[in-house]
Image (cartoon, helix red, strand yellow):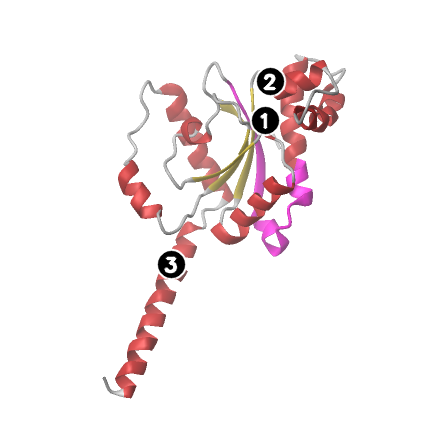
Amino acid sequence: MKPHHFITAIVATVFTAGTILFAAEHAALVSPDDALAKLQAGNKRFATSKITEGKPVAARRAETAQSQHPFAIIVGCADSRTPPELVFDQNVGDLFVVRTAGNLVGEHALGSIEYAVEHLGTRLIVVLGHERCGAVKAALATATAPGHVNSLVRDIQPAVKAAKGKAGDPLDLTIQENATQVAARIRSEAKLGKLAKNVRVVVGVYDLDTGKVEWPKE
């Protein structure tokens, strides 16, 4: 191959790769409002259908094998009854999920969120509490617990105190308050730099009985 042909081939390859990368990155940038609308539509399908839409898992697995562009980050509880992919009727690669008992965030969770925002293009963060949360129930019952469970009840105590004395069911109030405080912590502590203004953090509370996610006013 002649030198100038070789150089032309290299330039063409780099340009093509760059174009593909640019297109992929920008195709992945779903706005927070659009992402929330997709979650709400998916949850409606989950809550109202006996069988939700079929998911082409094999095709989606192949499509996402080399890269991922989740449109939402879900900070949820580890409770086995609250899998976000099912609750929101989404497929492989759609959601970036961080789960701990009580939907709490520490350094590892915050780092995971920062990674998804900066490197994966995700612009919506949902803190998903749920009805009858065991971790919140434990924190209401005691301020201390054996082993590492103590870290859970300890970090939920601020929500217990904030909800105390308010009208309504203490557990329900604390669940919502805990999710609200976790969302506030993400807003204040996640290092998102210039991207922060483009990221939205919202709270949802999942009803175990109906399958619906309620979206308290921000």
* Location of mark 1 (residue): 101
Q: Is residue 197 magenta?
A: yes
Instruction: Please tell me whether residue 147 is drawn above or below residue 137 in the rendered image.
Output: below
Work out whether residue 216 can be spotted.
no
Q: Pointer 2 and pointer 1: residues touching (CB < 8 Å)?
A: yes
Q: Quadrant of residue 45?
A: top left
- Local packing at callout 2 (Cα closer than 10 Å; few below 14, some 14-19, many 20+) is some
Q: Mark 2 is on which residue type?
A: Gly
Residue 40 in percent (x, y) is at: 45, 31
Q: Which mark is residue 23?
A: 3
Q: Pointer 1 and pointer 3: residues touching (CB < 8 Å)?
A: no
Nearer-N-terminus badge (3/2): 3
Which of the two marks, 1 or 3, is nearer to us in this view? 1
State the extent of the magenta-drawn residues as a range.
184-207
> For this view, does 119 lie left or right of residue 169?
left
Q: Quadrant of residue 165?
A: top right
Q: Which mark is residue 134?
A: 2
Which of the two marks, 3 or 2, is nearer to us in this view? 2
